Each structure stands twice: as structure tokens, then as C-alpha cells.
Image (spheres, rainbow, N blue to C red):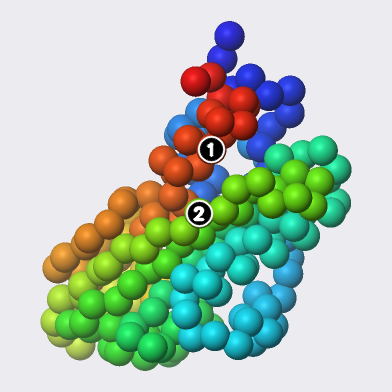
């Protein structure tokens, strides 16, 4: 008998390679079904500067959108927002906007708010959110240009212009919080729920 005892795989309502890799490494069989929702429109409708609430709303909306197409499936939605004080950041559009974000974050501490929602048949079964604090070092302009050269288009792949699990770690002097939360998926809370739901062996 395997650890996963449900008759069907978990459905991940995200195209995030990091979340896919985390679930794969944890032994959670899953398939990827991106929600393809308008995240910026949902953020505008939320009308709040609270990064935690926005992340929670987006995670729920992603899971619900995919659940509507996948009756009976257990669907996981996830989202992450970055806040510097009262200011929230979205993914940079290009190298120029990635540079601007990184200069704003340089030598300061920002927060990553990460939220998940698990849905079945349009019913929200579980929601959870966590936060991590990250402090960027006072890097030089020369380092910033070399960093952007090294990561290329990946700078626009994540909010803040970095992936902590890759060369982006060189931007930081201090990180406080769960590693999986920083990568975009509060795994321990998710595993605890899956065990309670009876799809993972207790």
C-alpha cells in the first residue's frame, strides 16, 4: 500500500514548477490543471492592500475555477503575494521592472504571504495561510546587473524577481520562515489536512 490512498490524483490548480516539484518530492500524485483566471482583476476586486487576504482569495478562486471543470476531484489552489510595508508587488513584466523591484527591496525586509485552498465539487474543504520575512542585503549595482544577466527571463517568473531556491539566494542576508512557504506551498499544513481527509495514510 502506498502513502496516497485516494482513488484519484490531487489536481494542482497552478502551473508553478516549484509547487509541482514540492508535491512530487513529497510523494503526492497529482496532475496540473492551471486555473487561467485573471489574477489582476481579482486583486482589484478585492480592494485591499492586505497581502495575506489577497493571497487567500486568489488561492480559493483558482481552486474553485478548476473544481468547476473537474467534478469529484480534490483540487489544490495556491498563491503567494509579496508585501513591502503597505505596498504589494506583482510579478515583474520584464527585466526593467524586475530591476526596479529589486532596487526597492534592496537592504530592506519584505514579507511573502502564501495561501492554499483545497476544494471538492465547489466546496472549500480547507484553507491555510502563512507568512515569511526575507531581508535583502545591500548588493551593488554591478551585482544586480550580473544577477539579471544570470537569471534571464526567470526574473519575470516570480514576484520580487527572484527564486530563492536558485541563484536568487545570493540577494539575501536573512530569511525567517518555513522554506516551503517561501517556495509557494505551505506543505506541512497541506499534508496534515490530506491525512485528516483520508487520502494520505495517517
Coordinates of residue 4 in the picture (x, y in percent): 59, 23
Question: Gap in Å between the C-alphas at discs 2 and 1?
Answer: 10 Å
Q: Is residue 79 above or below residue 111?
A: above
Would you identify the image quadrant in which residue 109 lies?
Answer: bottom left
Q: Is residue 118 above or below residue 131?
A: above
At label 1, counting other C-alpha atoms closer than 10 Å, the crowd grade (few under 14, some 14-19, many 20 or more) is some
Q: Residue furthest top?
A: 1
Q: Is residue 126 visible?
A: yes
Q: Which mark is residue 128?
A: 2
Residue 49 appears left or right of 161: right
Image quadrant containing the N terminus = top right
Coordinates of residue 155 in the picture (x, y in percent): 42, 73
Coordinates of residue 89 in the picture (x, y in percent): 45, 82
Coordinates of residue 194 in the picture (x, y in percent): 56, 34
| Number of marks | 2
Would you identify the image quadrant in which residue 37 lies?
Answer: bottom right
Q: Which mark is residue 67?
A: none
Dots 2, 1 in contact, CB < 8 A: yes
Q: Earlier in the sequence, mark 2 or mark 1?
A: 2
- Name the residue nearer the viewer: 27 or 49: 49
Q: Is residue 54 above or below residue 175?
A: below
- Name the residue nearer the viewer: 38 or 94: 38
Question: Please, what secondary structure does the residue beneath circle 2 have?
Answer: strand
Q: Which mark is residue 193?
A: 1
- Name the residue nearer the viewer: 194 or 15: 194
Amino acid at each position: 500500500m502506498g502513502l496516497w490512498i485516494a482513488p484519484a490524483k490531487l489536481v494542482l490548480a497552478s502551473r508553478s514548477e516549484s509547487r509541482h516539484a514540492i508535491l512530487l518530492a513529497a510523494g503526492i500524485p497529482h496532475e496540473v490543471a492551471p486555473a487561467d483566471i485573471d489574477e489582476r482583476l481579482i486583486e482589484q476586486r478585492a480592494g485591499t492592500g492586505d497581502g495575506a487576504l489577497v493571497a487567500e482569495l486568489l488561492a480559493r478562486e483558482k481552486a474553485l475555477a478548476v473544481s468547476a471543470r473537474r467534478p469529484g476531484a480534490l483540487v489544490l489552489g495556491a498563491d503567494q503575494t509579496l508585501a513591502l510595508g503597505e505596498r504589494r508587488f506583482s510579478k515583474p513584466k520584464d527585466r526593467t521592472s524586475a530591476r526596479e523591484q529589486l532596487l526597492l527591496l534592496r537592504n530592506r525586509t519584505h514579507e511573502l504571504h502564501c495561501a492554499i485552498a483545497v476544494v471538492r465539487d465547489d466546496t472549500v474543504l480547507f484553507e491555510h495561510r502563512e507568512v515569511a520575512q526575507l531581508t535583502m542585503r545591500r548588493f551593488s549595482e554591478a551585482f544586480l546587473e550580473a544577477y539579471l544577466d544570470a537569471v534571464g527571463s526567470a526574473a519575470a517568473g516570480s514576484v520580487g524577481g527572484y527564486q530563492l531556491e536558485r541563484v536568487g539566494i545570493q540577494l539575501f542576508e536573512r530569511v525567517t520562515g518555513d522554506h516551503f512557504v517561501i517556495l509557494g506551498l505551505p506543505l506541512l499544513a497541506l499534508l496534515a489536512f490530506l491525512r485528516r481527509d483520508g487520502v494520505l495514510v495517517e
